[in-house]
Image (cartoon, grey):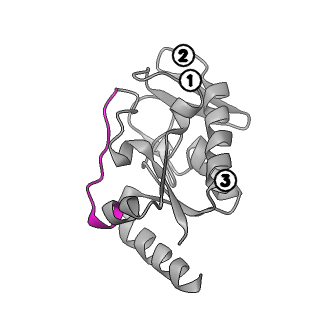
Amino acid sequence: MNKILVSACLMGAKVRYDGRDNLLDHPVLKRWHEEGRIVSVCPETLGGLPTPRPPAEIQSRFPILVTTKDDEDVTPEFLSGAEETLDLARRYDCSCALMKARSPSCGSRETYDGSFSGELVEAPGVAAGELLQNGIPVFNEHQLDELIRFVEQDDEAA
C-alpha cells in the first residue's frame, strides 16, 4: 500500500501561519491514517519558520522570491522546506500528495499573487511545485474525490 504525503494542517496540526489548523475531517483520511499511510508534513515549519509567523506570498517565480507581509525575505526557508518535503515523499515512497489549497508552499493549482490582497494566480506553491516537477501528483482538499480515485487505482495496480 502506497503512502500519501499530506499537509500537516489538514491533519489537525496547528502549524498554519496564524497558529491554527485546517483539519479535514474525512472518513477515508481517517482510515488511511489508521493504516499508517499518511506522511504528515508542513514545508514551512520544516524549512525553519516559526508558528505563528507573518503571512507570506510568492512575489516572483524566476527567480523565486517569497516575502512576508512585512517585506521580510523568507525564500531560503521556503526552498529548504520544499526540498525537505520532496525528500520525505521519496523516503516514504509516497505515490501522491494532498496539500492545502492556495498556500504559498502547498497550493497545487493556485496561490496568492504576492499583493496580499486576496488575488489569485494559477501557479503552484513552492513545495507543491517541487513535488509536481519530480512526478508526484498533488491534490488539494477540494479534489478529495480525485485523490481517492487516484489512490484506489494505484492500490489496484500495486
Residue 91 image label: 3
Pick whichever of labels 3 and 1 is earlier in the sequence: 1
Image position, residue 114 (x, y; %) = 51, 32
Q: Residues within 10 Å of mark 3 (few under 14, many from 20)?
A: few
Mark 2: amino acid? Asp
Mark 3: amino acid? Arg
| 25 inside magenta stretch | yes
* Res. 92 image quadrant: bottom right
* In the rendered image, the vertical position of residue 35 relative to residue 39, given as above or below: below
Pointers 1 and 2 in contact (C-beta within 8 Å): yes
Mark 1: amino acid? Thr
Write down the region rendered in magenta: 19-29
Magenta segment's dominant SS is: loop
Residue 67 image label: 1
Image position, residue 24 (x, y; %) = 30, 52
Q: Secondary structure at mark 2?
A: loop
Mark whose residue sits in front, 2 or 3: 3
Instruction: Give the Cα separation between the discs numbered 3 and 1.
Output: 29 Å
Q: Which residue is mark 2?
A: 71
Q: Residue at x 49, y 44 (%)?
A: 111
* In the rendered image, the vertical position of residue 58 relative to residue 23, given as above or below: above
Frontmost residue, 131 versus 31 = 31
